[in-house]
Amino acid sequence: MAGSDDIKRKVLADCKTVAIVGLSDDPQRASHRIGKYLKENGYKIVPVNPNLSEVLGEKAYPDLASIPFEVDLVDVFRRQEDIDAVVEEALKINPKAVWLQMGLTCPGDKSRVKDAGADLVEDCCVMVEHRRLMN
């Protein structure tokens, strides 16, 4: 099941490098607050935003394919209509997991994520789940 507590716990424990697709430099945006929270809680965050060069003191990349090192988790803050393309892009870099934030679900065949060897978490906040399950 995509997003069971066991899967969330495993993802949060095993994934230390988190690419955040759609990370904003605006402190009022959820992506910024959550990226800051993850960084403060020991995760290496990797901003993915083609409009920025740096966020939260970390070099930003225009897309997932441009990241020159392995990423464990792809955390997605994009519009629902962009999710299919982002999931496809994510699977090309072989993360351990793909996490779709509140209100976002994986369209089409969800088994493609599992078939690629990754876990899938949908429609929930990584920060809320980290506080609930890991603290």
Image (cartoon, rainbow, N blue to C red):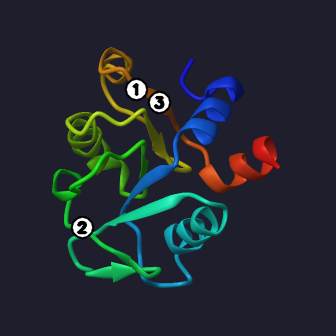
Task: Indicate the secondary structure of the residue bearing disc 2.
Answer: loop
Q: Residue at x 48, y 42 (%)?
A: 99
Q: Residue at x 53, y 67 (%)?
A: 35
As shown in the figure, which amino acid type bears the numbered disc 3? Answer: Leu
- Asked whether the residues under the numbered discs 3 and 2 touch, taking CB atoms below 8 Å apart as contact, a structural biologist would say no
Identify which residue, 37 or 86, lies in the foreground: 37
Indicate which disc residue 61 carries: 2
Q: Is residue 91 above or below residue 18?
A: above
Locate residue 89: give its quadrant. top left
Residue at the (47%, 84%) spot, across then down: 26
The residue type indicated by label 2 comes to: Tyr
**First in sequence: mark 2 vs mark 1:** 2
Say whether residue 37 is left or right of residue 117: right
> In the rendered image, which residue does mark 1 sit on?
118
On residue 120, the disc is 3
| Residue 42 placement (x, y as % from top left) | 62, 60
Mark 3–mark 1 CB contact (< 8 Å): yes
Residue 57 position in % (x across, y down)? 43, 82
Residue ID at (39%, 33%): 106
Query: What's the CA distance linking mark 3 and mark 1?
Result: 7 Å
Disc on the earlier residue, 3 or 2: 2
Q: CA distance from mark 2 to mark 1?
A: 22 Å
Foreground mark, 3 or 2, reads 2
* Circle 1: element type: loop
Relative to 35, is 64 on the left or the right?
Answer: left
Residue 58: percent from left, percent from top? 39, 75
Q: Amino acid at mark 1?
A: Ala
Q: Which of pointers 3 and 1 indicates the residue nearer the eye?
A: 1
Q: Quadrant of residue 38?
A: bottom right
Relative vertical location of residue 36 with respect to residue 43 in this rendering, above or below: below
